[in-house]
Amino acid sequence: MAASGWGLCRGLGASFRPVGRRTHSEARAHPKPEYDAVVIGAGHNGLVAAAYLQRLGVSTAVFERRHLVGGAAVTEEIIPGFKFSRASYLLSLLRPQIYKDLELKKHGLKLHLRDPYSFTPMLEGGAGNKAPRSLLLGTDMEENQRQIAQFSQKDAQVFPSYETFMHRLALAVDPLLDSPPVDPGAFQQGPLLQRLKSLSTLRPLLQAGRILGTQLPQYYQVLTAPITKVLDQWFESEPLKATLATDAVIGAMLSPRTPGSGYVLLHHVMGGLEGVPGAWGYVQGGMGALSDAIAKSATAYGASIFTSKTVASVQVDSGGRAHGVVLQDGTEVRSKVVLSNASPQTTFLKLTPQTWLPEDFVESISQLDTQSPVTKINVAVDRLPSFLAAPNAAGGQPLPHHQCSIHLNCEDTHLLHQAFEDAAGGRPSSRPMIELCIPSSLDPTLAPPGCHVISLFTQYTPYTLAGGKAWDEQERNAYADKVFDCVETYAPGFKSSVLGRDILTPPDLERIFGLPGGNIFHGAMALDQLYFTRPVPLHSIYRCPLPGLYLCGSGAHPGGGVMGAAGRNSAHVVFQDLKNMSS
């Protein structure tokens, strides 16, 4: 059912045609026949790479298959009057140097920091008329301790030490994000001087070791153990442990009991905004406004960005070097180098002629773990949800908890594990883990007056249902109904407030945004697919077996999230290679 107006969209099973924002780049319909560099895909990493290359004097063009830039960081008006961050929906991980270098504030980027940032309501019967308890966390440590003390005085006392412990680990990992991984092969090949220069790549690792010091064994455990084991050593109250554990499984087909889930938690706590470590926020105008700011920076330097231009293949010259791309309409665009912001699978299995790639490399790429548990549901509502644990104010104005990541079905780590086990058996979770965000609580430009947009980031949902069954409209709506029923138990009246919804299962995320398996990171953030094994061993420093072809997206180090590091790092590697070619 198509939406005819925001007030007439009561059909819960409705599917809406996205009305994407037209960008400044669409007018450039005809690319030049040749550039120094071509970037495949205008996701945020591709745009960052283009901006840095052009800033360094490398003539760069970006080709995007969709009608708008941003990849998964886009704003789309799915229902008239309601602007959704349709896929990615929060900002924290974007590298501070990128803000500064690309002058993103000058190009229109405005942020709304969230404080408090986490709200976990309980489902419990209160004594008399007493509301159920909830856990509200923010930047005020004393208030955090008061909140945690509702569940455990011991946990309240130790929580500051836990935060300090995790902050130190984040500081240690931080330098590793802004440089290519160590290349073990470089120490064994080439002239002696070149091999000695390669030792400089060890500097971030040595710096990390100095920060961690004698506590290295404890930090090693965080990265390798199940997050439940780590949290059990710190805390006793389940609501606190489950709230913290959500960051260890978000976007990952992992249980909190899965070894290595601790790194996923670290990945989500090592960001920051406006100088506030670990802060998360909303981009004014939705995530597409961030992509637009990066695109404006790139074009201000002179880069060319083309939308609705699908790359069909990478061109290879007779010497076995990438030297441009062929567009779907047959247009050939030559270049000295090609950077792909597409996933490793799309880049090497679909766009690159297979004859130029080693068989073992192709096999390794085809075997990458891309499992995804995520179904994203975007919802338009005519009023804020009113939670039993924190009822709305009389005037219906947003309260502090409305700006948070609101965790539902997250009172106990066992609930999270059960939700995972459902999906491992090919069934959508019976009590899915839900992260509910209301960006319009801080950014009223996203919805008509009095109305709001809600993001429901839910898991676990398998890519293929039990018995090999595919997601159809009936299955999609049945799952969304189940999610809405869960929200209703915490916030009665939610379902009657819904004006329309957009349901994106793992196959939908793959089809629309090019995310393999629906994986928001382009591949699992597992220890065997990180650092110098991302995307595969021996090919982790953005270069590929085909000379002149580079990865610059989330499938490369340091991985997924709206971080921009892969784009920035790859641009510097490409620039150095171009300098070496010309010398």
Image (tube, grey):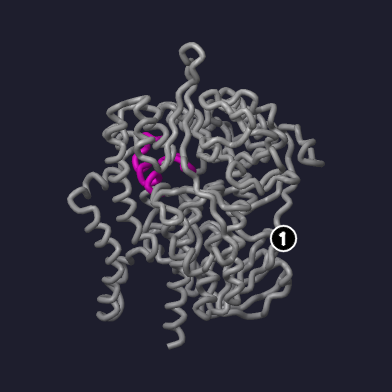
In percent of the image, x 65 and y 34: which residue is there?
476
Indicate yes or no whether the magenta region holds residue 250: yes
Q: Quadrant of the C terminus?
A: bottom left
Mark 1 highlights which residue?
A: 22
Label 1 CA crowd tier, 10 Å (few <14, some 14–19, many 20+)? few
Whether residue 499 is situated above or below residue 353 in the rendered picture: above
Q: Most extreme residue toward the right, as rendered?
A: 4
Secondary structure of the residue carrying numbered label 1: loop
Q: Could you say where residue 428 lies in the image, as x and y percent from the top left?
A: 55, 31
Q: Residue furthest front?
A: 395
Answer with left or right where residue 420 lies relative to residue 283.
Answer: left
Image coordinates of residue 420 in percent, x first then y, are: 46, 32
Q: Nearer the viewer, residue 157 or 399?
A: 399
Image: magenta residue range: 248-267
**166 lies left or right of 355:** left
Image side of residue 474 versus residue 301, left or right: right
Q: Residue visible at 64% across and 46% down?
A: 444
For the view shown, which residue lies furthest in the top direction? 128
Q: Is residue 268 visible?
A: yes
Residue 555 pos. (x, y %): 48, 57
Residue drawn at x 61%, y 68% as measured from the top left: 296
Q: Residue at x 47, y 18 (%)?
A: 124
The extreme left residue here reads 214
| Quadrant, the N terminus | top right
From the viewer's side, name the closer residue of 105 and 483.
Answer: 105
Q: Quadrant of residue 185?
A: bottom left
Using the image, determine if residue 24 lies above or below residue 578: above
